[in-house]
Image: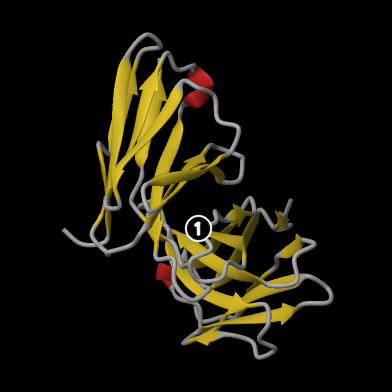
Amino acid sequence: AQTVTQSQPEMSVQEAETVTLSCTYDTSESNYYLFWYKQPPSRQMILVIRQEAYKQQNATENRFSVNFQKAAKSFSLKISDSQLGDTAMYFCAFMKHRYSGGGADGLTFGKGTHLIIQP
Amino acid sequence: ETGVTQTPRHLVMGMTNKKSLKCEQHLGHNAMYWYKQSAKKPLELMFVYNFKEQTENNSVPSRFSPECPNSSHLFLHLHTLQPEDSALYLCASSQDVGGVHEQYFGPGTRLTVT
């Protein structure tokens, strides 16, 4: 079984600052995927960024980037130039790799980090 | 309608009631999921359906009964629930192709059991 740990229940930064959210995971799988999801007050879960474990290059999406350390089983999210709209719960999630046609698999989530961007 | 929709958005029910949650995806996906989000706990996977077949039941009590009549619709039938079942129930869908199955979530149903 997989576990995902987010050790920061809440973080608060000023607008335009850079913030890093931490995530560690435990698995015996060698091939898997990691995700960061954002859940604003509306409760709609939105995919922020994903990382394939077989890729050494860290994923980036505009202001969002990850620091993926496979050996350390660490997957942190960096938000640059933070904006008020970034205020939300952020969840780190793990999924085992499935080959095409191999069926679907659920996500294992961490408890989340509540990020507050102050004006 | 686009994406993943869920109805109702809010539901209050007594412990002896029977109700159903509905999820519909308009993305052409072939896999659908139910998750439970309780306060102070991580999201918990409940059920997985792939091509209408249930492939995972994550030790969910029998008072929760899923139904997937086709790849676009997913139901969660509820009966004789307990107050601790009050939570946000999230539906998601994904496409089973080529490895990464990004899951797209609906807005959730906020369930309160009285």
Q: Residue furthest right?
A: A71
Q: Amino acid at mark 1?
A: Ala
Task: Report the front residue among B31 and A25.
Answer: B31
Q: Residue furthest left?
A: B1
Name the residue beneath numbered marker 1: A104
Residue B105, given in percent of the width and then of the height, sits at 38, 56
Q: Residue furthest bottom?
A: A57
Left-right relation of A27 to A37: right
Q: Chain of mark 1?
A: A
Residue A107, given in percent of the width and then of the height, sits at 56, 56
User: Looking at the image, is B106 positioned above or below residue B66?
Assistant: below
- Residue at 75%, 71% (x, y): give it: A30
- Residue at 61%, 69% (x, y): give it: A34
Q: Secondary structure at mark 1?
A: loop
| Residue A12 visible | yes
User: Looking at the image, is A60 positioned above or below residue B113?
Assistant: below
Task: Report the front residue among B78 and A38.
Answer: B78
Location of residue B78 by image quarter: top left
